[in-house]
Every structure is written in structure tokens, then in C-alpha cells.
Amino acid sequence: MLATAVVAAVTTPVVLLSVTPALADAKSSVASQAQQRGAQDKPSIEELEKAAEKAQKAYDDAEAAHQAARVVLDAALSDDAPLSVAAKAARAEATAAATAKVNADTALADARAALAALPETATDEEKTAAEKAVTDAETAAASAAGAKTTADEKATAADRARDDARVAAVREYGKVQNALKEALKEKEAADKALADAQEEAGEPEEPSCVPEGKLTTVVTGLPSKLVAGATTNFSVRVTNGTKKSMDRVSPSVNFHATDKGGYNVIDDAFQLQWSTAAFPAWQNVGEDHKAGTISPLKAGAHIDVKLRLKIDAKAPAGHGLAFVSGEYSNFDESCGGNFATEYAFDLLAAGSAVDDDVDDAKPGGTTPPTSDNKPQGGTSGTVKNSSDDDGSLASTGSSSPLPQFAAAAGGALALGAAAVFTARRRRSNSAA
């Protein structure tokens, strides 16, 4: 019965306007503008931009509501939920009451049998005692039957209260799921309408992003020596050192390593997961190397992103770099980020002993390519540290363990820096 109710709750159509008024506002924005201006008059780009911002805000709200509803649903379905605990206790009481009734009924049957088995020579005292035993057993049996009925009713009510709460939680979660799908649909429609209008007007679809040295990403707790087969926890503090709030900030963490020869790349040996206070469950860092999205990051504020690194036990000893950077995008389509900062480390073979006081990996810059030190694949360029408060990009020198490893890593660094300034605008990557 509960399973059927859960399926019905999830699949029942939902009136979205009652769930997210903000989405309704965003959804009707373009239509209402068109009605006011006349059916033949198209909305302006500025109006479409505002509509896209509203749709984005509605989507962000729906996404947050979806995460919160999932927490509520998991809590409601848990065996540790208060109603679940109460139902379990009531069912245990009902079981005990049923056992007590069986025992009372058995005692009554035994008393009646004993009375019937009295011989004709039994004394009046023996007959009186046997009759009293039957009367007492009948009273106890009636009491046990009443207690069982009460306990059964209590258990049934407790089960119903638990199941009702679970169905309600599933139903609300279904509403939020539908709201999120609708919000995404409306956001994509608003983004497309704006992109089409900009393309028709000849406006560039891809605004340029700018370097922002006051957006900092600082690693804490990453050892300078890592062992294959081990798991390491560390964190990245993302700080908005500007005077303006950033609507969406995405920290990026990427591990690159080679064997001791410096030519065999072993990046696949590194598996990275992230977690924040807002999203405590560990989640994998994908191919885009993004460790979650912070939305928003206010001026002067910082957030710590927890990271968990697992290294394949089969990875050979070698040297590595962790590239850490951050990019931001705002609803007004401004965007930017900092250049990747590298943290060098030694990779030790599985089973290697490491001192407890091993130093943390230190931030550094990159070595500019020269005639005898070029990135593999013919890529050239310099990736610099962006930690200066004035936003300038100052190189801090090489932190690569070996020259040959610096050569192997140069291409990855150059690509990481370039990615910040070719990032798509907010509405193109916000659904990632």
C-alpha cells in the first residue's frame, strides 16, 4: 500500500505555480512584455536579459529547494525518524500483548480442564478452589484480550502516521522535482530567446572574461609527499576579495603526475571528490575539474571546500602537480577568474612510509617555456600566479620537482589558464 502511494505521489501532476512563484514570474515575463508592447513588437534585448535573469534565479531557487527536499525525504524514510521509532515501539507492544493473550487463554483452558477433571470424591474446598481458578483465569483472559485490542489499535495508528508522513514527504519531493524540471525548461527557453535576439542584432554571444586576482583559491593540508593506494583529505579556501558579490563561483582542482622519468603520464591514478557544508555528501570531481559551485559568494566572504584524494595503489613513484584555480560568472554576464596555482608533490610507491611531520605542498608558479623547456605537443605560453591583491599576474618561479616534469606539465598548465578566459557566459554553463 505504501509503495503504491509513493509511486502515485511522485507521478501525480503538480500545479507548478503554487510551488515556485518566482518561476511563474520568470515564465510570464516575456509574454507579459509582448502583450504590453503589442503582438507585432518584439521584446528588447534588455527585457530578454531581465527575463533570463529571473529564469536563472528561479532555477537556482528550485535547485536549492530540490536539495533541501531530498534531505527531508531521506529523514522521513529513515528508520530513525521519530514516527518510525514510535511505530516500531507500538508494534513491539502489540506483539507482547498478543503473547500475553495467548498465555492467558492457555491458562484459562488449563483451569477449565482442571475443574472438569475433578473426581466425584473431590471435597467442597477442592471444587471451590478449582471454580475460583477458572473465574480468575477468565478475568485475566478478558483483560489480556482488551490489552491486545488496545495495543493493536495503537500500532495501527502509529503505522498509519509513519506512512502518511512518508507519503507526504515523497509527494512534496515529487512537486519539487517537477518544479526543478520546469525551471530548467523555462531557463533554457529564456536563454535561447536572448541568444536568438543577440544573434539577430549582431551582438557577440560570447563576452570576454577577465582575470581577477582577488578571487583566491588556497590549498590547505595537501602533503608534499603522497603515497599510492592512500586516501588524503585536504581543503581549498575560496575567497572573494573584491568589493562585489559573485553570483556563481566554481573552484577547479586538477592533479597531473608522471613517473620518475617524467614522460609517462599517470593522471588516471588520481580520483578526487568534493564536499561543502551546504552539500556534505561526497561528490566526484568530473572531467571539467570543478569542485562544486558556490552560489553566491559575497564580497569579502570565503568558503572552504573539502576534498578527498584517492590514489590507485598501482601508480608508480613519480612527481606531480595539483593545479588550483577559480572562475566566476554573474547574472549581468560578467565573468572571469584567477590563473591556476600549482602545488608540487612527490608521489611515493604503495606501502612507502611517510613521516607524520611531512611539510604541506607549497604554492608556486610555472617556468616560462624556453628553447630547451617547451610544453609537450608544441604548446607555448606562461601560466602565472594571481595572488597579488591588485589583480596583477606575477610569476613566483618554478615549483616543479624536476625540469623534465615541468616540461610534461607545461601544456596542462597553459590549457588550465586559457580555460578561465574562454569560459562560456553564465547562462551557457550554469546548468553544469
Image (cartoon, rainbow, N blue to C red):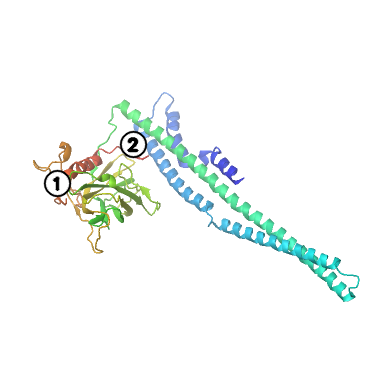
Is the C terminus in the top left, top right, bottom left or bottom right quadrant? top left
Is the N terminus in the top left, top right, bottom left or bottom right quadrant? top right
Observer-nearest of 39 and 229: 229
Query: In the visual, does 175 lie left or right of 109?
Result: left
Observer-nearest of 271 and 429: 271
- Would you say the residues marked 1 and 2 are in contact, meaning their CB atoms lie under 8 Å apart? no
Q: On screen, 197 above or below 182?
A: above
x, y (%) of residue 49? 36, 35
x, y (%) of residue 222? 26, 56
Q: Marks 1/2: CA distance?
A: 38 Å
x, y (%) of residue 286? 33, 43
Whether residue 20 is visible to the viewer of this picture, yes or no, is: no
Query: Which of the two marks, 1 or 2, is nearer to us in this view?
Result: 1
Query: Circle 2 — which element?
Result: helix
From the image, tell me which residue sits under label 1.
Answer: 404
Rendered image: mark on residue 428: 2
- Single out the residue that lies furthest toward the right: 120
Q: Amino acid at mark 2?
A: Ser
Query: In the visual, does 373 lie left or right of 19?
Result: left
Lower position in the chain sequence, tag 1 or tag 2: 1
Q: On screen, 77 above or below 429?
A: below
